[in-house]
Amino acid sequence: MPGNAVNGGGSGAPGAPAASHLRARGVTRHYGGALPVHALGPIDLDLVRGEFFAVVGPSGCGKSTLLDVLAGLSPPSEGEVVFEGAPVRGEVPDGIGAVFQEDASFPWLTVRDNIAFGLRRTGVDAAEIRRRVDYAVGFMGLKDFSAAYPAQLSGGMRQRVCIARTLVLQPRFILLDEPFGALDQQTRLLMGDELLRLWRETGATILLITHALDEAAMLSDRVGVMSARPGRFIDSLTTGWPRERDSRIVAEPAFGAVTARLWSLLRVESLKAIGTAGAAAP
Ligand code: ADP
């Protein structure tokens, strides 16, 4: 059974699949156990190099599962994921970095050592590690905190450390799973600005999973809307924002139109997810 397609900026046109930075075809994920779950798909997805793609969908529809499969953290049950022309299977390929909601900083390491942690395991030489960590510390506004421990930082600062830790690995494709979910609204907006700056500066392709429709609408070039579980893409909405954008876009009339459209697409699926689909009409 073919997946329902979500194609980036024309890259999915027949005869042009090589343009996809990341391509997924017919991807599904089932979990076994006493109560087997069909969590995801089938899904088709094409991401253009350098695009900012957000994924929204009802709770439990398979968003985190999708991220795990695309990043190579877990294998699909069926289908195939291809990153930069090579199949993703069994491990996270070089060039892919992931950031998660939970605070993944190590409490016993300073900010600087947290940021260098993954890099030290890659065989990069000490001078290059120093250079990259200096850059990430500066870029994420952590200079005054580089000798601090996570417990001495706010939630927003700790999440910056986690982003910096991914940034030093110089990923070309960054996947983020609800990275700002635990933060207050103002901090989320400002962290969104930082993420946009990082996206522009690095030229990376970004896939952001979020439950916040305003976050998806503000940050992305394109939003993929998922159905209730098993999650499939039911629509894809192009925001049309310029590359130079920031959180002030929330004041634009077009912003309200994008979030309203997202909610109209998601409302019925969200009611299905909480088991009250009968109340969805009209
Ligand atoms: P979302 O991120 O959209 O909230 P998830 O991808 O976390 O959804 O989960 C999708 C479905 O798969 C849910 O029903 C969840 O309970 C189930 N699920 C997720 N991980 C596992 C697992 N390791 N084992 C069994 N079921 C799982």
Image: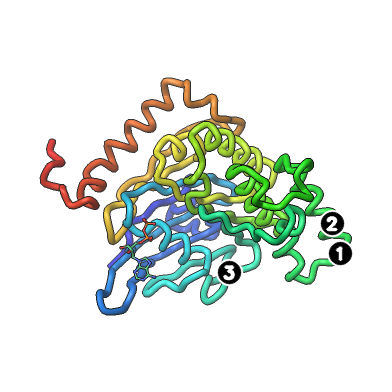
Q: Position of residue 93 (x, y in %)?
A: 60, 68
- The disc placed on residue 92 is 3
Between discs 2 and 3, the one toward the N terminus:
3
For the question of whether residue 19 can be seen, the reply is no
Please tell me whether mark 2 or mark 3 is closer to you in this view. Answer: 2
- Kind of residue at disc 2: Arg
Residue extending furthest front? 152
Which residue is the site of mark 1?
Answer: 126
Mark 2 and mark 1: Cα distance apart in space? 6 Å
Label 2 residue SS? helix
Q: Position of residue 47 (x, y in %)?
A: 50, 53
Query: What residue is at 55 percent from the left and 64 percent from the top?
Result: 83
Query: What residue is at 46 percent from the left and 46 percent from the top?
Result: 54
Q: Nearer the viewer, residue 76 or 134?
A: 134
Q: Position of residue 186 (x, y in %)?
A: 53, 31
Mark 2 residue crowding within 10 angstroms, few (<14) / some (14–19) / many (20+): few
Q: Is residue 35 above or below residue 256?
A: below
Label 3 residue SS? loop
| Pointer 2 with pointer 1, Cβ within 8 A | yes
The quadrant where residue 44 appears: bottom left
Please tell me whether mark 1 or mark 3 is closer to you in this view. Answer: 1
Q: Say left or right for 69 vs 265.
A: right
Between discs 1 and 3, the one toward the N terminus:
3
Query: What residue is at 65 percent from the left and 43 percent from the top?
Result: 198
| Pointer 2 with pointer 3, Cβ within 8 A | no
| Pointer 1 with pointer 3, Cβ within 8 A | no
- Kind of residue at disc 1: Ala
Which residue is the site of mark 2?
Answer: 130
